[in-house]
Amino acid sequence: MLAAMSSAAPRSSPLATAVARDSGDACPGAMRLHAADDGALARVRIPGGVLAVDQADALASAARRLGDGELHLTSRGNVQIRGLDGGCAGELAALLEAAGLLPAPSHERVRNVVASPLSGLDGRGFADVRPWLTGLDAALCASDGARELSGRFLFALDDGRGDVAGLGADVTVRATASGAALLSLGSSGTALRVPAADVVRSVLTATEIFLTSARSSAARTWRVDELPVSADDLVRMLGTQLSGTGVDCTPADQDTSTTDGPAPGVRGEALSVHVPLGRLSLEQWRELTRFAAEAGTGELRLTPWRGVVVPAPRSAAAAALARLAATGLVTDPASAWPRVGACIGRPGCAKSHADVRVDAARAPVAQAGLSLYWSGCERRCGRPRGAHADVVAVPGGGYRVSADAPHGSGRSVPLDDPSRITAVLAALTGHPA
């Protein structure tokens, strides 16, 4: 049972993101399907991206029997199944529940947890986040209050390397060299240092503080930075409440350093592959799950960068590189594909002005240090955080390309032929393609 909240009125935040909403959270889930132009869509939450082989097989079976035959990875390490018949929700839920992918049906949309995918596998990081991951997922599923969270609310468990800490989560936990953890909320510049053993308890308390503040807000509030309360004030409230319940916590400066996700190739005791544009064919999925079973771990870890990490002995991982590359998965760390992303585009989205994934596949870019994101319309769904170039389809055909600092000035230029993207980017940024 969480302790009672402080009754002190928090200050309004000048950084709050004003969001006008006249309806409830329509974020899709495994049981709440979304009607897209290519059929219904189900989003299956995979906390930490961790899947057992039998669970991976169940997802493949669902995609083959009920969907378009592909598995689509999201920027939160989750899985989408597209092309569903809108009347298959019951059959899909039964299949997923039998595989242990719906441990708490009433909470399935709030199990949004990303975790450092190489944690415990490559000798980097300060802690293996798996105990936090399993503990937090179980605690969320057991919490009545957590059911109120939006399907957009995000938790990040970082082993200290700074990969998922840069994903803009609502609650971020970051391991430290001292064995403790830094807990922060939204874009707060401050954090709380808490004992590793109290991480799950502290995260749940932070979640309750968010929900209490959201209930008192005049507008529908789904993310921490949308609250009319500063994130720094929330951190102070959290510290007061945790201290009152016996948790030894102290204010600390936020660690703002970040790193990229795992590059393709052998990484410690694991094999990392990138999935171009997040689309996994059943052949690719079968090869990954077969390798996971052969490696003896029986586990796959989906990453927020649309990749898959398979824990495996180094020798086995090296031997599997060519086999997986032959299916179209990216195993070469020099590949440009990890820097190319796209929304679903046509025909899956009625708002899209182009089949952006086809165009992106025709024009992978090798612009050094610059990520490229193709969007079918100005909404730019799923675009990454950080420096990147936006390629946005416009009505009537063609695209507008822009690149923010440090690579560009923010101006945009037209692109009529996707094959010319490297030349356009060179002109836009001043760097040769």
Image: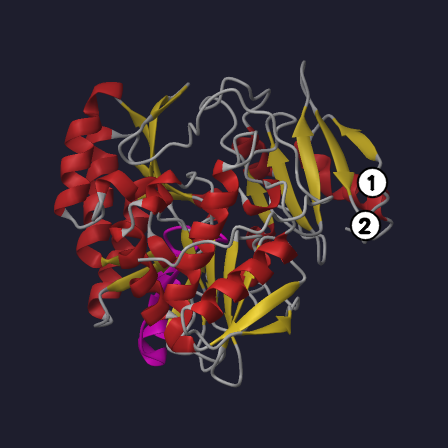
Over which residues does the magenta segment extend? Answer: 304-330
Q: Which residue lies furthest to the bottom in this view?
A: 178
Give percent across and percent down for residue 255.
Answer: 64, 70
* Secondary structure of the residue carrying numbered label 2: loop
Viewer-proximal residue among 254 and 390: 254
Q: Residue at the location (71% across, 58% down)?
A: 369
Q: Is residue 229 above or below residue 256?
A: above
Q: Which residue is at the far top?
A: 396
Query: Residue at 40% across / 49% down in the picture?
Result: 112
- When the figure is inspected, residue 170 is found, relative to residue 180, above or below; the finding is above
Which quarter of the image is occupied by the N terminus? bottom left
Structural crowding at the residue carrying mark 2, measured as other residues with C-alpha within 10 Å and reported as few (<14), some (14–19) or many (≥20): few
Dot 1 and dot 2 residues touching (CB under 8 Å): yes
| Disc 1: CA contacts within 10 A as few (<14), some (14-19) or many (>=20) | some
Name the residue nearer the viewer: 45 or 377.
Answer: 45
Quarter of image, res 266: bottom left
* Relative to 285, 91 lies left or right: left
Q: Which of 364 and 204 is in front in this view?
A: 204
Which label was assigned to residue 410? Answer: 1
Residue 86: name its quadrant: top left
Q: Would residue 292 be visible to someone looking at this image?
A: yes
Residue where numbered disc 2 is placed? 405
Left/right of residue 242 with respect to residue 363 in the rendered view: left
Q: Which amino acid does label 1 sit on?
A: Gly
